[in-house]
Image (tube, grey):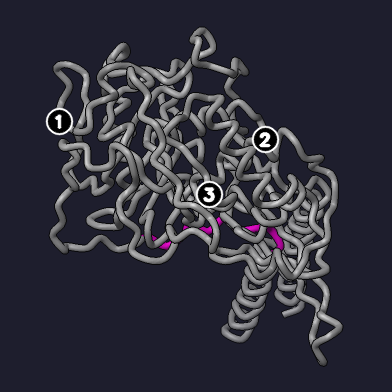
């Protein structure tokens, strides 16, 4: 009896172990949407910068490096004109914290020097701090580049990566010389992973960096984002680079009229192509494809998050723009010159979104340009992203392959378990 029971238990354990391996392998064949690790909070004291005296009324803060030094022979850009009256309403000319009458105090632990919360659909500005103060956007300006590229480029066109793409300064997704990339994949790399190599490949197709910067500035001006001047397509700091919390809300709202933009900022992970070995390097090997994930923490951590765009440079510090939906209401939050103290920017954004959602409807301190305004140059309907968990940005063939692979593993694992259990039953009967 003991021998029979021990053999039966051994058979069951073997079957269970093999089943676990089969299921694990099946899960491994499916893209995992891992949540990026949290930045642990710090107890280092901080003081939210006071902007009551309008220190950034005309220009961003002084650079800490050489990014603002013009190239030889190029003039130093003059300060952008200050519109009078202020775009969006008289209260948005204020430089401190701007709240609706009778509103509760803003959340604590917000280190962003400038911020704004507005309604994505109505365009109402609900609350702000130094809304028209001028700061550097870092990679949040890729929202403007994406708007132009999505309306201009053939997304099915395939381009070949170059050395110049691969050597782009700053954050790179991993484009390699000789690799083949569709413009859709470049947009995924630009929006989800903030790839400056993708920005370079896109700008090349738009006519080069100088032409692309001119197109970005022209679009910003047409949207009445008059605190904005782009110096680079990617958001790397350059002479004259500028935006404001108000303008960034305007630019993001315009991008959200494009359904694919709304889809991509909501996508957690996609597969990205590899590239071939460099024939000039002895022994070099082909680089396989790899997954890229969305670098926006809010997308993973905040219920109702629609997506957004992160940014960072030494001069701009932390920048952020994102949107979320709650009870049929969609709000957008922008942060400029933030720090990771005492909370990372996405957590600061979450607190400001909570604050905005808690304000009664009709609470407002100003407006974004609207289709009915003389200031507006756009009247397109705002897009909605797909439901969370539906990865429409993935190539259909790739998505099908993953699905089929997982199905095969699950079915195979089930059959294996049943066969082992049947074998155990037969051993029991023989004994």
**Residue at image x 54%, y 32%?**
220
Front position in the image: 136 or 351 = 136
Q: Which residues are magenta?
A: 29-38
Q: Quadrant of residue 222?
A: top right
Single out the mark in the foreground, 1 or 3.
3
Q: Residues within 10 Å of mark 2 (few under 14, many from 20)?
A: many
Q: Give the structural element (helix, strand or loop) at label 2.
A: helix
Q: Which mark is residue 231?
A: 3
Label 2, label 1: how many angstroms apart (C-alpha)?
A: 37 Å
The quarter of the image holding the N terminus is bottom right
The quarter of the image holding the C terminus is bottom right
Label 3, label 2: how many angstroms apart (C-alpha)?
A: 26 Å
Look at the numbered discs 1 and 3 and tell me whether their residues touch, using CB distance below 8 Å.
Answer: no
Q: Give the structural element (helix, strand or loop) at label 1.
A: loop
The x, y position of residue 113, in whole percent, is: 26, 45
Q: Which mark is residue 138?
A: none
Q: Which mark is residue 105?
A: 1
Does the segment drawn in magenta span residue 304? Answer: no
In the image, taking residue 1 as reference, residue 133 lies left or right, namely: left
Magenta segment main secondary structure: loop
């Amino acid at each position: 009896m003991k021998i029979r029971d021990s053999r039966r238990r051994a058979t069951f354990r073997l079957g269970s172990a093999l089943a676990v391996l089969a299921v694990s392998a099946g899960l491994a064949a499916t893209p995992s949407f891992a949540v990026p690790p949290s930045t642990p909070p710090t107890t280092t004291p901080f003081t939210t910068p006071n902007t009551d005296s309008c220190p950034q009324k005309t220009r961003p803060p002084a650079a800490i490096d050489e990014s603002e030094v013009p190239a030889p022979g190029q003039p130093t850009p003059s300060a952008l004109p200050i519109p009078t009256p202020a775009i969006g309403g008289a209260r948005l000319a204020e430089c401190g914290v701007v709240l609706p009458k009778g509103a509760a105090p803003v959340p604590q632990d917000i280190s962003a020097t400038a911020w704004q919360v507005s309604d994505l659909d109505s365009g109402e500005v609900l609350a702000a701090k130094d809304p028209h103060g001028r700061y550097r956007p870092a990679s949040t300006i890729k929202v403007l580049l994406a708007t132009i590229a999505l309306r201009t480029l053939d997304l099915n066109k395939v381009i070949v990566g170059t050395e110049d793409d691969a050597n782009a300064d700053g954050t790179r997704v991993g484009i390699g010389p000789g690799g083949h990339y569709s413009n859709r994949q470049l947009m995924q790399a630009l929006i989800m992973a903030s790839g400056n190599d993708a920005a370079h490949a896109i700008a090349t197709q738009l006519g080069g960096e100088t032409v692309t910067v001119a197109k970005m500035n022209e679009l910003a001006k047409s949207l009445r984002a008059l605190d904005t001047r782009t110096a680079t397509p990617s958001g790397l700091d350059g002479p004259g680079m500028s935006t404001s919390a108000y303008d960034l809300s305007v630019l993001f709202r315009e991008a959200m009229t494009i359904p694919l933009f709304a889809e991509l900022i909501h996508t957690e992970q996609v597969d990205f192509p590899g590239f071939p070995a460099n024939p000039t390097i002895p022994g070099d090997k082909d680089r396989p494809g790899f997954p890229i994930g969305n670098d926006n923490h809010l997308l993973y951590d905040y219920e109702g998050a629609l997506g957004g765009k992160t940014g960072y440079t030494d001069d701009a510090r932390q920048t952020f723009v994102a949107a979320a939906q709650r009870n049929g209401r969609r709000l957008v939050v922008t942060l400029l010159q933030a720090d990771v103290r005492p909370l990372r920017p996405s957590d600061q954004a979450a607190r400001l979104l909570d604050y905005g959602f808690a304000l009664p409807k009709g609470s407002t301190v100003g407006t974004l340009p609207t289709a009915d305004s003389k200031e507006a140059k756009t009247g397109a309907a705002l897009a909605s992203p797909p439901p969370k968990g539906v990865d429409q940005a993935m190539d259909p063939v790739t998505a099908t392959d993953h699905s089929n692979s997982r199905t095969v593993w699950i079915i195979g694992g089930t059959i294996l378990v049943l066969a082992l259990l049947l074998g155990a039953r037969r051993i029991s009967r023989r004994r």
